[in-house]
Image (cartoon, rainbow, N blue to C red):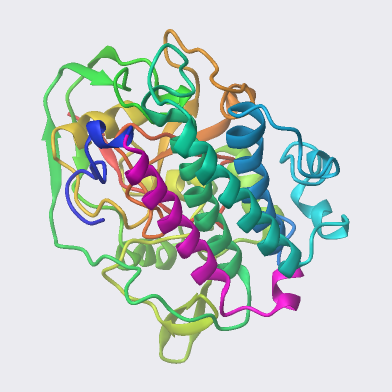
Amino acid sequence: MTGEVVERAFAVSDLASKTRIAAELDRARLGTDALLAPLSDEELRRQVSPLQSPLVWDYAHIAYFEELWLLRTLDGVGPLAEAHDDLYDAFRHARDERAGLPILEPAAARAYAADVRERVLETLDRVELDGDDPLRRDGFVFGMVLQHELQHSETMLQTLQLRDEPYPLPDRDGVTANGKGDVFVSAGSFTVGTSTEPWAYDNERQAHELELQSFRIDGEPVTNARFLEFVQHGGYDDERLWTPTGWAWRQAEAVTLPLHWGRSGEGMTRMRLGHREPLPADEPVRHVSWYEADAFARWAGARLPTEHEWEASARRGALQLAGAVWEWTSSHFLPYPGFRAFPYAEYSAVFFGDAYRVLRGGSWATDPLVARTTFRNWDLPQRRQIFSGFRCAHDA
């Protein structure tokens, strides 16, 4: 996933191919199963953090979402289990409540997911993926379900990162800096969003033109070495660098380092999936909040880019290290002109407003099918369990 712009894994014309959809569904499930394979049933049931669900809840929720949209909504069949509407609807119970619910045991969750998938493949074989129905056209509803599973795989990796116990390290989950400096982007009209991407979410639509002033943007995310300079120069102690809410958050949480960093006699370290290791100087800093990113930018005499500046730069091929970390922007999560909630309001519309900040790009844990240039991620500005970093921008 390195490179200047992350593109789709396959062509638009392939999306409506039933064979390709089935293969992508299978790929996602194999990845989910492999992710959880090293864990015991006890670990799957465990509530690691109030910010995250038990892993077995995530697994069954993936199957429930698939059943809801591909069997019940698309194919008109009844629910496989009435209780699942309460247990696995993400809006019924907060994450820190889910371990106390009568959720499925790991073996039952696997059996449920396998049953749903078998029925889904039969449905895929029967349904038409064209016509006027926007759920069916270009296989959109299958793409939505597929992306949902891939996104939850990243969520489960966030949970695994919060554990103290060692988990098998991936072959490579960091991208080293290449020393590229900042990039000048001249003023002009830029297209933001999409009206043609068949599997894009509602918040990515519609494509529209924006006038942007000239700006400069870092060619790569801020590295651990650069962020360490901020720490060593008292960045966490200088109230002038923080917004009032950011300063209050930092004091209340006693935050003095990025999440998972630590000090040792030999220098700074980090915890990665339960393994303590020397801090890699030339990898992008990760697990920082929006407040930390914004404070660093102020310290550096810069600012965070807007999400529109980020996308304009990506479309121009100006950004490096895509796929290393999600990147905080200065933008609040707001609807685009002409926004229409589809196929359900709870995906985007309920989160619009000033509470959430937008992240762009995609992390090492984000599947390329999700990490497209127009994809908009969002979270609360204090969140650090996500694989989040940032780059800086300057007016020009």
Would residue 257 be counted in the magenta stretch? no
State the residue lying farthest toward the bottom.
265
Would residue 29 be counted in the magenta stretch? yes
Task: Tell me the quarter of the image containing the C terminus.
Answer: top left
From the viewer's perspective, tell me whether residue 319 is left or right of residue 284: left
Q: Is residue 358 visible?
A: no
Question: Residue 369: image x %, image y %?
Answer: 34, 45
Q: Please tell me which residue is depicted at 43% across the width and 48% down the height of the picture.
A: 293
Q: Please tell me which residue is depicted at 23% across the width and 52% down the height of the picture.
A: 220
Question: Residue 172: image x %, image y %?
Answer: 32, 73
38 or 328: nearer the eye? 38
Task: Classify 392 as above or below 339.
Answer: below
Kindly indicate the quadrant of the structure image that contains residue 101.
bottom right
The chief SS type of the magenta part is helix
Kindly indicate the quadrant of the structure image that contains residue 2.
bottom left
Question: Residue 286: image x %, image y %?
Answer: 43, 60
Question: Residue 197: image x %, image y %?
Answer: 31, 26
State the residue lying farthest toward the top.
338
Task: Tell me the quarter of the image containing the N terminus.
Answer: bottom left
From the viewer's perspective, tell me whether residue 52 is left or right of residue 136: right
From the viewer's perspective, tell me whether residue 222 is left or right of residue 107: left
From the viewer's perspective, tell me whether residue 274 is left or right of residue 110: left
Task: Classify 104 as above or below 383.
Answer: below
260 or 192: nearer the eye? 192
255 or 107: nearer the eye? 107
Q: Please tell me which residue is depicted at 68% across the width and 45% down the height of the picture.
A: 64
Task: Classify 153 as above or below 123.
Answer: below
Task: Specify the segment rendered in magenta.
Answer: 17-46
Q: Please tell me which residue is depicted at 31% across the width and 54% down the height of the picture.
A: 323
Task: Classify 388 as above or below 316.
Answer: below
185 or 102: nearer the eye? 102
